[in-house]
Image (cartoon, coloured by chain):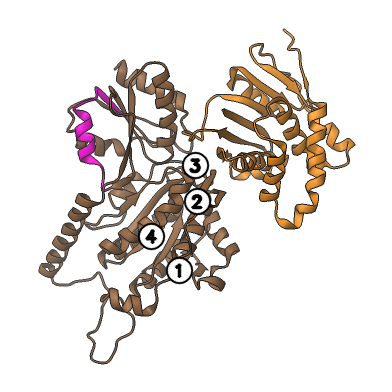
Chain colours: A brown, B orange
């Protein structure tokens, strides 16, 4: 019989990381994600799987420790919340520029600046448009349940190594702090040095006699070489866009109106759909699971069917830009969302839908 | 069956842990549950609340704007949450420190003087279990045997010797809760 546990989203990330065979976690505490490292420290995986868990002196140090570990072909990760993730942006662009796989969890809180410690979704732009410099992308997964917090650790590492690119799990204070039932996967062994040597010819595992030097860097002084590298990066992102889009459709078949929401807003909107349907309003919901790559085609198809779209996000309106691009402004698209750590209720979403889309 | 509950009071009253035990009891009964706390500095004083949902079916939103039951343990929470009980719903409150009693007539109001009772029983820490007992008397959403199992799951093993005391508090809560006539 499968064992179900009741735990917070943050705790689920920690347990999933140990069980998946992650080699290292480097982090610095910040509300509302501190339970990730707290759980790892309590579980002491260094005694069981050999996983390293280290509290760095800052977020800047954490992300650069991730860079070091990733360069050795190890499966390494960090987690933080908005202000901490801002500090990591330099590291993230270097990781992308050096084509290193890693997983970064952002349990988003209200901003800007030090902001609040309450949930928000206002780091969408930073995650999917690249908070650091240069033409890079972060593959971004948005969990909407504690179970997905656990499952996406594995999914994120698979994508990170498949594309040799950092992957972000973009969560928020609700999914991080809430408790739900979760089924954890069986323990998997960590990769052996032999496995890494065999599978990752780029990893710096120590130069053997006669072997070519492996150099991990993002600097290239010849702009023509740098341009070629950028074309290669873009080809990689194109492949990712073609193959990795994930989404969930809820009650879309006969929908006349559409809510688009991810993460905790998707959970709130699901309730709004239930209430609206009871009132006889035909509403459906599209939940992007990957925010980059974004489910553009699916939205474009739905735009041919519905009369209007409400983008629901705890922000001043960030994802709405990608929705508008996807539907090419063929139908009305509006945004609704509370700001700065205030959570919108299912009722408020219905009111916004009625005012901005149905009545609009 | 679906029960949407808000438990609200002061930080330190055991609001969050009461919700956790209730959620665990739901897990023991093979039901879907969610537990969404107010987190942060509230835990160290000030108001604290937790939304618990127990359901036969998958739970959509862990965040709600109206509740089947509100369990209210201080005046601030009364001011904030009385209006958010669904018509026909249930409000349970501890009279300690309450100056403005509930006024709604379209809900059923119960009072449980758990603060007083906990002091009488000389076990202030079981206050929240008295309240939980009272709640389960009027809303038997989970079986008491599953609550005990839930307690075992949510308490660290070194505290398992306290389970009989908590069970006693739950039973006492069931005895002392009583329905209130709402005055106009």
Label annotation for residue A183: 2
Among numbered discs 3 and 1, the one appearing first in the sequence: 1
Among numbered discs 4 and 1, the one appearing first in the sequence: 1
Q: CA distance from mark 4 to mark 1?
A: 11 Å
User: Can you give x and y, in whole percent of width and height, for residue B51 in the image?
Assistant: 58, 34
Write down the residue under mark 1.
A24
Mark 1: give few (<14), some (14-19) or many (20+) Cα within 10 Å.
Answer: many
Q: Residue at 19% of width from left, 61% of height from top?
A: A233
Question: What kind of element bears circle 3?
Answer: helix
Quadrant assignment, res A321: top left
Label annotation for residue A174: 3
User: Can you give x and y, in whole percent of width and height, for residue A302 in the image?
Assistant: 23, 31
Q: Are marks 4 and 1 on the same chain?
A: yes
User: Can you give x and y, in whole percent of width and height, for residue A21 in the image?
Assistant: 44, 67
Question: Is A246 placed left or right of B94 in the picture?
Answer: left
User: Can you give x and y, in whole percent of width and height, for residue A316 in the image?
Assistant: 36, 35
């Amino acid at each position: 019989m499968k064992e179900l546990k009741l735990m917070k989203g943050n705790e689920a990330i920690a347990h999933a990381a140990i069980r998946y065979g992650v080699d290292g976690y480097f982090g610095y505490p910040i509300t509302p994600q501190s339970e990730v490292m707290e759980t790892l420290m309590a579980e002491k995986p260094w005694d069981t799987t050999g996983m390293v868990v280290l509290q760095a002196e800052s977020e800047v140090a954490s992300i650069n420790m991730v860079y070091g570990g990733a360069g050795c072909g190890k499966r390494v990760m960090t987690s933080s919340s908005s202000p901490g993730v801002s500090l990591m942006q330099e590291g993230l662009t270097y990781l992308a520029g050096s084509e290193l796989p890693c997983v970064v969890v952002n349990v988003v809180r209200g901003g800007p600046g030090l902001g609040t410690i309450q949930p928000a979704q206002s780091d969408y732009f930073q995650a999917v448009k690249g908070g650091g410099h240069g033409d890079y992308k972060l593959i971004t997964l948005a969990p909407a349940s504690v179970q997905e917090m656990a499952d996406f650790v594995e999914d994120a590492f698979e994508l990170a190594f498949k594309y040799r690119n950092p992957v972000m799990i973009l969560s928020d204070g609700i999914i991080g702090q809430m408790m739900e039932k979760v089924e954890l996967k069986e323990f998997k062994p960590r990769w052996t040095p032999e496995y890494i040597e065999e599978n990752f010819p780029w990893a710096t595992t120590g130069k053997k006699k006669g072997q070519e030097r492996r150099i991990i860097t993002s600097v290239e002084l010849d702009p023509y070489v740098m341009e070629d590298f950028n074309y290669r990066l873009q080809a990689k992102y194109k492949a990712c866009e073609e193959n990795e889009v994930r989404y969930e459709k809820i009650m879309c078949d006969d929908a006349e109106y559409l809510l688009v929401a991810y993460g905790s807003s998707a959970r709130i909107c699901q309730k709004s759909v239930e209430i609206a349907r009871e009132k006889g309003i035909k509403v459906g919901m599209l939940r992007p699971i990957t925010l980059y790559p974004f489910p553009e085609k699916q939205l474009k198809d739905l735009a041919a069917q519905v009369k209007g779209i409400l983008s629901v996000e705890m922000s001043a309106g960030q994802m709405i830009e990608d929705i508008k691009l996807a539907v090419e402004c063929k139908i009305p698209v509006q945004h609704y969302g509370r700001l700065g750590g205030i959570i919108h209720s299912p009722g408020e979403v219905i009111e916004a839908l009625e005012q901005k889309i149905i009545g609009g | 069956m679906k029960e949407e509950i808000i438990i609200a009071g002061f930080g330190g009253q055991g609001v969050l842990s009461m919700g956790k035990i209730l959620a665990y009891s739901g897990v023991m009964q093979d039901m879907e549950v969610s537990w969404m706390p107010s987190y942060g500095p509230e835990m160290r004083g000030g108001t604290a609340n937790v939304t618990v949902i127990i359901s036969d079916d998958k739970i959509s939103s862990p965040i709600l704007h109206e509740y089947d039951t509100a369990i209210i343990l201080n005046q601030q929470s009364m001011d904030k949450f009385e209006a958010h009980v669904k018509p026909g719903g249930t409000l349970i409150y501890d009279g300690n420190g309450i100056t403005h009693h509930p006024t709604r007539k379209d809900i059923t109001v119960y009072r449980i003087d758990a603060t007083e009772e906990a002091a009488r029983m000389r076990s202030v820490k079981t206050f929240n279990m008295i309240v939980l007992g009272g709640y389960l008397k009027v809303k038997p959403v989970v079986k008491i045997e599953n609550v005990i199992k839930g307690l075992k799951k949510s308490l660290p093993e070194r505290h398992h010797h306290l389970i009989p005391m908590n069970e006693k508090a739950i039973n006492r809560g069931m005895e002392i809760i009583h329905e209130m006539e709402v005055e106009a």
